[in-house]
């Protein structure tokens, strides 16, 4: 049997109830949670393969006849666990707004243009070193109705499966220097300042493509196994 | 070297863009052994209103209690085509649905067997991280000494057990708050 997974470090994961994000008030559990032991159920997870995805799934600028509007960017990074182990075969799903800050979704009624050449969805299966890479468009900021004059900072949604169902993670990647971050209740939902900063991608010269697209790097860390007693002795 | 896990963020209201391509509501194609079951339910918020933007994901063993995962050390076969994973996105009525097989008994702590169950993960706008719960089957004698169910206060256990409708469908609702609030786990 694999070992249990380590519980999150203090203040690095958000609470369920966080009133500055208004939708949590009617959706957060009100009864105490029951601590779940990690049985074989929690220590296993579905396996995905190259049969599940297509090559064009990772290039969001090539999914339609024409080119989408906006600034092309390369978003890449590694998926690791807390023990610094690269995680291969992780299914990474992303979705985002277009360059004007509009989602291709019936619920989004923001008065900004849709782009017929941009859906805003991508998939990637990490390689042996845990690496992933997407070509996309820099998403726009957009208003929402959480509070007066609320605007979401530019972000890309990420969904990941690890090797255990308790490693499942959905998060958002932000961009460096975004002035909206400090006003955003999603970004500020955890007290740990370093944990917040890790949600911000870094400009990356190495993955920047000359005369084509800027590169941003975003490494993602999933929970790691607790050390075995033998490892503890080292 | 030890790293710290990336902070979870909400799935937001536009989850369909990214997740709809892999909706899996039928987990057991032909050839997968086991008792066929249909599961239906609704996600209900603290005002008693249906949640129309939730992703409900299930993870389960096959009829032999074996998970389709390399992390499962049991030397038992898994049928080709059985992944054990399902994803349903709720509709305007807050409804989700799965057709699958009833899982077998997977090993639990201390060499005991667990009762047949689904692991359930729920994402939605208004949740900064997923909710994790379990669904058990009604009238299964193994429920009585299931090692996880027995950790749940007795008066709340029924929220984790589906009800069998006259037509044989299992009904199991996810109630986020209030009376009959579903038990959620600190995972």
Image (tube, coloured by chain):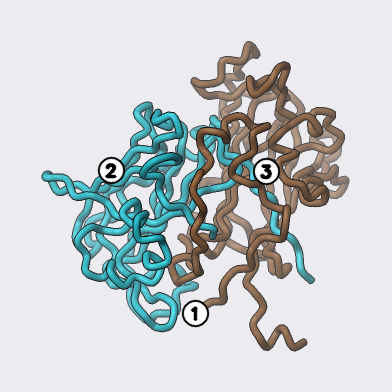
Chain colours: A brown, B cyan
- First in sequence, mark 3 or 1: give its number: 1
Disc 2 to disc 3, how far (Cα)? 36 Å
Q: Tag 2's secondary structure?
A: strand
At which x and y percent is residue B88? 39, 42
Residue B152 image point, x, y percent: 41, 61
A205 relative position to A229: left or right: right
CB within 8 Å, label 1 to label 2: no
> Within 10 angstroms of label 3, few (less than 14), some, or many (20 or more) residues?
many
Q: CA distance from mark 3 to mark 1?
A: 35 Å
Q: Residue at the location (40% across, 75% down)?
A: B108
Please state which of the two labelled residues, at mark 2 or mark 3, is closer to the viewer.
2
- B66 shown above or below A162: below
Q: Residue at x 66, y 86 (%)?
A: A229
Q: Chain of mark 3?
A: A
Q: Residue B69, relative to residue B45: is it above or below? A: below
| Residue B8 makes an appearance in the image | yes
What residue lies at 57% left-to-right and 39% top-to-bottom? Answer: B11
Query: Tags 2 and 3 in contact by the CB under 8 Å rule?
Result: no
* Mark 1 lies on residue: A1
Mark 1 residue crowding within 10 angstroms, few (<14) / some (14–19) / many (20+): few
Q: Residue A93: image x %, image y %?
A: 57, 45
Q: Which residue is mark 3?
A: A134
Position of B127 with respect to A39 (left or right) is right
**Please, what secondary structure does the residue beneath circle 1 have?**
loop
Name the quadrant containing residue A146.
Answer: top right
Which label belongs to residue B40? 2
Residue ranking furthest to the top: A111
């Amino acid at each position: 049997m694999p070992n249990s997974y380590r519980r999150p470090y203090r203040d690095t994961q958000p609470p369920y109830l966080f009133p500055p994000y208004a939708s949590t008030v009617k959706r957060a559990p009100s009864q105490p949670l029951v601590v779940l032991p990690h049985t074989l159920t929690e220590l296993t997870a579905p396996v995905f393969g190259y049969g599940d995805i297509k090559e064009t799934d990772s290039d969001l600028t090539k999914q339609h006849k024409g080119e989408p509007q906006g600034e092309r960017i390369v978003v890449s990074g590694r998926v690791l666990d807390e023990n610094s182990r690269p995680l291969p075969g992780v299914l990474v799903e992303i979705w985002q707004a277009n360059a004007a800050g509009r989602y291709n979704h019936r619920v989004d009624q923001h008065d900004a243009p849709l782009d017929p050449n941009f859906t805003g969805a991508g998939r990637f299966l990490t390689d042996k070193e845990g690496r992933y890479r997407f070509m996309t468009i820099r998403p726009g900021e957009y208003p929402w109705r959480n509070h007066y004059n609320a605007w979401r900072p530019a972000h890309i949604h990420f969904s990941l499966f690890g090797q255990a169902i308790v490693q499942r993670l959905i998060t958002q990647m932000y961009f460096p220097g975004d002035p909206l971050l400090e006003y955003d209740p999603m970004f500020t939902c955890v007290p740990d300042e370093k944990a917040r900063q890790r949600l911000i991608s870094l400009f990356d010269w190495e993955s920047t493509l000359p005369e084509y697209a800027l590169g941003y790097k975003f490494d993602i860390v999933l929970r790691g196994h607790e050390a075995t007693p033998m490892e503890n002795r080292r | 070297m030890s790293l710290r896990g990336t902070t979870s963020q909400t799935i937001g209201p536009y989850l369909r863009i990214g997740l709809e391509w892999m909706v899996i509501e039928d987990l057991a194609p032909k050839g997968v052994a086991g008792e066929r079951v249909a599961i239906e339910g609704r996600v209900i918020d603290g005002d008693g209103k249906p949640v129309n933007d939730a992703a409900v994901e299930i993870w389960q063993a096959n009829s032999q209690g074996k998970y389709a995962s390399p992390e499962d050390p049991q030397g038992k076969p898994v049928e080709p085509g059985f992944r054990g994973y399902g994803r349903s996105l709720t509709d305007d009525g807050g409804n989700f649905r799965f057709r699958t097989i009833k899982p077998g008994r997977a090993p639990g702590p201390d060499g005991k067997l667990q009762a047949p169950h689904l692991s359930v993960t729920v994402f939605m706008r208004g949740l900064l991280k997923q909710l994790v719960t379990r669904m058990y089957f009604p009238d299964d004698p193994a429920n009585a000494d299931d090692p996880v169910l027995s950790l749940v206060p007795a008066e709340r256990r029924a929220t984790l057990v589906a009800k069998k409708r006259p037509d044989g469908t299992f009904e199991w609702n996810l109630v986020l708050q209030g009376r009959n609030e579903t038990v959620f786990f600190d995972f």
